Image (spheres, rainbow, N blue to C red):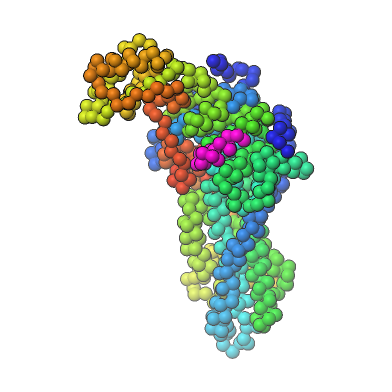
Amino acid sequence: MTAMPSASDPDAIIVVQNLVKTYAARGRASEEVKAVQDLSFTVRAGEFFGFLGPNGSGKSTTIKVITTLLQKTGGSVRVAGYDVDRDADAVRRVIGYTGQAVGVDGQLTARENLMLIGRFYHLHGAALRRQVDELLSVLQLTEAADRRAETFSGGMRRRLDLGAGLVHRPRVLFLDEPTTGLDPQTRNGVWEHLRRLHRSEGMTVFLTTQYMEEADQLCERLAIIDKGKIVAEGTPDSLKAEIGSDVVTVRLPRSENFEALRSDALAAVQKVPGVNEAKAFDGGVTVYAANAGATLLEILRVLEAERLTVQEVAISRPTLDEVFLKHTGRAMKIEEVKPLSRMPFGGRRRMN
Amino acid sequence: MTTETLRVRAAEAAPVTGSALSEIGWVAYRSLLRVSRTPIVLFFSLMMPLMWLLLFSQTFGSVVGRGMALPGAAPLPYDFVAILLPGIATMTAIQSASQSGFGMVADIESGYMDKFFVSPMRRSSVLLGKLLADGLRIAVQSMLVLAIAWVMTLLVGWRIPFATGFFGALLLSVLVALFGVAFSGLSNTVALRTRSTEATMTASFALTFPLLFMSTAMLPAQALPGWVQSIAVVNSVSYLADASRALILTGYDWAAIGKALVAIAIVGALLNGWRSKRSARRAAKVTRRSPRPPARAGAVVAASILSPEDL
């Protein structure tokens, strides 16, 4: 298990300390919505770091504060040594950002989109043209380079958007839910590109996601965020190891006194030797055991002794789903972002 | 070429600072490139003014011409359309300016606005570049309207003096474009407040006609009823129309042009001032409807950067 990097780590490239971001609830000035509460974490240079959490957990707020798109309420945020408030321009020069919405201009061609983004970063001439050509090739868009982006498929747009975040060769790339809304196959393609970019460029990548699998596949280290707080942090393996080696899911049949039966079952299995922990969930109880093979029989025996009927038993290796469940007490629900239903909001935005 | 050829450049991008002018230029370039990709939009935006030019002026021309000629005096040496022309150019500007907010809403919704704001570009360049593009577009539209009227004088013998010739027409178009840019503040405000293109369209449609008819854009002051005259005096459109009409009918009236510029400045200051007060209030009392991630955060930046202290 790797040690958590501290704020004073010489390799630290993103240092967030006690970050707070609150919004006033609309129409009720006295009420505040805490999007992010007292968040602290550090990302090392070259790391692929993930922020995993459900919708509304504060992922996007955090990424927007770090990328200077949102003004924080409190705490301190530094990127590559620059303060996001005082040296916002320096921060902007070293970071790339790809937001949840695919912000490519459909009326322009892929090449025009990338060239123009380069201009926004004050790049010009042959160097810019070469960089754009390279990016188009890396993202496998060379053939479509001179087609308008509005004719692109969802995956192609995503790749182009990714390219827009890379034109100026940032040291840190921020990706806000880069695969939300994509079909599984396209998602795999985007992952492949991200892995390659990270490997070949040695770039630090900060990614937010609501997909367990995405975090597991891509991130070297991740933090699980829920309701504006980090509930767990570590490598995917170390987080899963914390659970214990195995998960036994015991489903109980639906009945009128389901909840009473479930608490009986919970009490019973907790006494079984070798069981690290047991938790109730909607359908029954989840048992975390060092060795499921050895404890399964005993678990079933105590349940039978309590005259509890078992509907189904399953043994699984822990996944990040179990990690999330363990730290928050609920399963992570994924909602696809529907662009039209996104809520408008008002927040203090950066003006300098 | 493979991924491996895209090598790491660990060193930070050199802190090149581009000039504000080049930033504004590139933002404007993008807007104009978009216009050039859908020229049909430009054409449709000319439909209404052209309809007025070709139909309205002809239908009402004879009536107005007779009504305006004083009893016993010689008939007017030009057609009604010559009187109406500056009004139609102004209409083009108001229409285009009303649509200025659409692009802003689209950029916020698509996430493009965030691309501007994560870059080290000056915040003000985003707005100024857009205004520059709007101004150029309106000037071109106005020149097109004038050119069509000029062609009509050659083809079907419309009597329009064009007293100041090409350069006068150019000056007229510049005035109209400046007015459009100042007036676009209203559309941008409605667009940002409502984030709805429909609301923006309705608001601008509702305003276009009162603004035009309660001014000297359609008829000179002496031909207006008394109560309209008293409104026209405080309507900025009148000053633009008076200066423009002189350019078409009589010549360079520098006093009128000066007044038009003052009127444009006041409109710009008022509409932008109102907006900045709103955005300041917004900034002071940050609001949000639900505890969800800020999906449309761009809107507020746009609102904030639209304040005149950046200009």
Within the image, what quadrant is residue A156 found in? top right
B308 and A203: which is toward the camera: A203
Residue A179 lies in the magenta-colored region: yes
Q: Is residue B267 left or right of residue A274?
A: right
Residue farthest toward the left in the current orientation of the protein? A256
Q: Examine the rendered structure and indicate whether residue B268 appears above or below residue A49.
A: below
Name the one closer to the observer, B78 or A34. Answer: A34
- Residue A71 magenta-highlighted: no
Q: Judge left or right: residue A165 versus residue A257.
A: right
The quadrant in which the C terminus of chain A is found is top right
**A293 is higher (above) or lower (below) than B53:** above
- Determine the residue positioned at 63% across, 52% down: A148
Q: Which residue is drawn at 46% across and 44% down?
A: A338
Most foreground residue, A296 or A340: A296
On the image, the x and y values in percent for residue B1 come to 73, 38
Most common secondary structure along the magenta stretch: helix
Q: Which residue extends farthest top?
A: A273
User: For this view, does A325 lie left or right of residue B149?
Assistant: left
Please name the residue shown 62% across and 35% down the image: A193
Please state the horizontal and vertical placement of residue B214, each as a whole percent of the image. Answer: 51, 68
Instruction: Mark yes or no: residue A78 visible.
Output: no
Question: Residue B103: percent from the left, percent from the top?
Answer: 57, 53
Residue A78 in the image, given as x and y percentages of width and height: 60, 26
Quadrant where the N terminus of chain A lies? top right
Q: Which residue is drawn at 54% across and 39% down?
A: A185
State the extent of the magenta-drawn residues as a range. Answer: A178-193
Q: Quadrant of residue B244?
A: bottom right
Q: Residue furthest bottom?
A: B72
Q: Is residue A279 visible?
A: yes
